[in-house]
Image (spheres, rainbow, N blue to C red):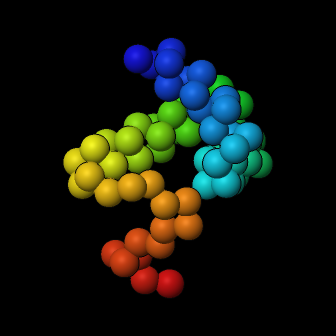
Amino acid sequence: MRNLFFMCSLNACKQNKACRYLYRRIVAKGKRKELALIAVCNKLLKQAFAIVKTGLIYEENYKSTLIKN
């Protein structure tokens, strides 16, 4: 499963804005690219779990009501 999510994270960095932002932010801090991809894997896993748990459809522009800006 880890290898599968790792391969998905490569594509997610190209297609998903949130994943791309996370990847670029971590690399800009001077971290290794592999570490940034693992962070994207973690994000994808959390998104997948939340979708399965709640039964809601994925929304790319979703803004959490728990986070106050």
Q: Residue furthest left?
A: 53
Image coordinates of residue 62 in percent, x first then y, are: 48, 68
Which is more toward the observer, 31 or 9? 9
- Taking the image as shown, residue 66 lies to the left or right of residue 34, namely left
Which is more toward the observer, 20 or 16? 16
Which is more toward the observer, 69 or 65? 65
Image coordinates of residue 40 in percent, x first then y, are: 56, 39
- Taking the image as shown, residue 9 lies to the left or right of residue 41, namely right
Which is more toward the observer, 27 or 1? 1
Q: Residue at x 23, y 48 (%)?
A: 53
Residue 42 can be seen, yes or no: yes
- Residue 3, placed above or below residue 62: above
Marker count (numbered): 0
Image coordinates of residue 4 in percent, x first then y, are: 50, 18
- Residue 17, placed above or below residue 9: below
Q: Residue at x 47, y 40 (%)?
A: 44
- Taking the image as shown, residue 56 lies to the left or right of residue 47, namely left
Q: Residue at x 41, y 72 (%)?
A: 64
Image coordinates of residue 38 in percent, x first then y, are: 54, 31
Residue 26 can be seen, yes or no: no
